[in-house]
Amino acid sequence: MKPESFFLLLLLCAVPVCAADYFVATSGSDTGNGSASQPFRTIQQGIDSARKPGDTVTVLPGTYSEELSLRSSGLPDKPILIKAATKQGVILDGAGRVRDWRLVDHAQNLWTRSFGTSSPYNNDHGRWVMAPRSEQIFVNGKRCTQTQEIPTADYSFTATMANPATYVLKLPQGMTPDMAKTEITVKTNLLNVRADHVVIDGFVFRRVRNTYQNAMVTLHGEGIEFRDNLLEYSSAGSGLGIQTKHSHIHDNIFRSNGQFGFATGGSDNLIENNLVQGNDLAGYKEWGTGGTKIVGNGNIIRRNRFIGNLGGVAIWLDDGPCNNVIEYNYVSGNYGEGIRAEISFHSYIGFNIVEDTKPCTSTMFGRTQTHCIGISVQNSAEICVVHNFLKDNLGVGIQLSTYLRDASNLSRWQMNYADEPHRKWLRQSWDSKLVYAYSNLFFNNVVVQTTTKPTNACVFLMGLFNGQRPHCFGNQFDYNFYWNPVTHAPKIHFQKMFEVPDGRSEWQTRYGMDTHTLAGFSQEDYAHPAFNDEPPYKPTAFFAGFGKGKDLKNILPWDTDIDYLGKRPDNPRKLSMGHIQ
């Protein structure tokens, strides 16, 4: 090669490659070049063209019927951007119009149509007793209700499990499905991202038919930003599935999805300023449904609104996660539970408002039970519940409980992420086949129950002994404020009488749990029928009359060496943690 040619090649290699801008419009063509004057017709063509860091795909307003796949990665300072030209003006729709319905009952105005494949039904490998819930029909934009019997109410339908599926649809008298715009969900997902450093901005994702524990949009990768999107009507699954690291999920709306609004198994993500509303539309009403489920580690769930989710738990930590932060969320009007930490480790729940939680009755493992709790900590360790305001949660304000849970089936992948204290807790649980609950702290919370029902306890302690050597120890309730105008405060309810022998809870005294409050209640305010209306312990300088409240900016008033009676506990207690930095 001539010297001048060699230097020319070096010069060309040194020239940065310019990012490209591509455009998509419903009036475009995939044979075009994707410019503003010759836009592509499909979003997928735009995505496939954007292969370099910094490339941008701008989608013009309209409705698109596609299942998108994104595989090209950007760089931290040059992400690939897929954006709607107008915020939420681009609709990715998984439903299609279906005509040629046949009238089968004139008096009831019942119509039938065989169409597509049977429902992609999944009941979690037989674990749940539930009917298929993944079909959806919309008539003139109105979502119809699925039933298991021949429909009797207007805008309801039933569907078979055969191939093709057979639908029976009931409409108001005088309405025909062919004259109306009758649509059935046909796509199973709308976007699958397997890439790093991409931005998804401003889309509407709506109406898919999918299964329990699947999602309408799934994210895999690192450094993904998912912002200003609306996700609704994921039929039997979640709106968004997050399997990412170091990603930012913010300013989205997750509403009216079949299971969760969003669910994450990812780690170290920031999820903030989202609205999560009216999910569990499929009506599972089980603890495995609701606003969100987090099984990953190190996530921050901050300043979100969880409103009116229809069943299960609004914010649920489960299956061994650690180091998560749940803070400054507004959790209102949900059914079941506001916030639950179950089989979780070393996480922080602080400065949340949890109010107006409503009862939810579910059938699980052959048992029918009703739950209604503001904040619940179950079979967990080192959970810090601080500075929360809980008001009028129609069952219990705060619950701490354990149950005989076989820990041998906890997720093993958690060990790959965990730090040494977390690994120790996991190994201890696996080896003993029992999840230990210890060193949980409930500090400076305000629990207000203004209802007149005496069963609306401020605090509920459940299943702490289970007839065996206690596996729940070293927990503390300190400087909380409890108020119930009927039963006075704090109303602390014990599940079983044998847990309070001799008018005093051994768990309170020997295993490190104290109940303190912020304001001046008398001894009588601590009375409880379980103790023949006598106070279970005498107030001290640390109790109601003298308590002034403290803040986590100072050292926590938690003596790890001695218990309330000045004795050393049978089981060692661990130090508490403050706010996770």
Image (cartoon, rainbow, N blue to C red):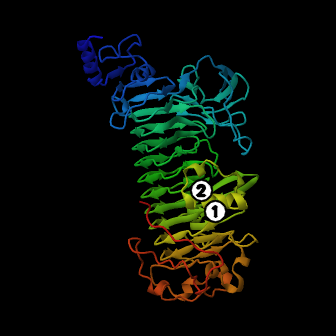
> Quick check: can you spot residue 122?
yes
Q: What element carries label 2?
A: loop
Task: Say few, some or many: other residues with alpha carbon within 10 Å of mark 1 (under 14 / 14 to 19 / 20 or more).
Answer: many
Residue bearing the label numbered 1: 379
Name the amino acid type tagged 1: Asn
Residue depicted at x 65% and y 70%: 472
Amino acid type of disc 2?
Answer: Gly
Quadrant including the N terminus: top left
Q: Give the residue pinned by disc 2.
A: 336
**Above or below for 462 versus 249:** below
Across and down, in percent, residue 393 comes to 54, 63
Q: Nearer the viewer, residue 344 or 171?
A: 344
Residue at 58%, 45% (x, y): give it.
Answer: 280
Could you tell whether 406 is left or right of 94 in the image? right
Task: Tell me the number on the disc at residue 507.
Answer: none
Q: In the shown orientation, is residue 480 left or right of residue 135?
A: left
In percent of width and height, residue 63 lies at 44, 24
Q: Spatial distance from mark 1 to mark 2, Cα to Cα? A: 18 Å
Q: First in sequence: mark 1 or mark 2?
A: 2
How far across and how far down the image is residue 98, in percent? 58, 20
Q: Which quarter of the figure has residue 369?
A: bottom right
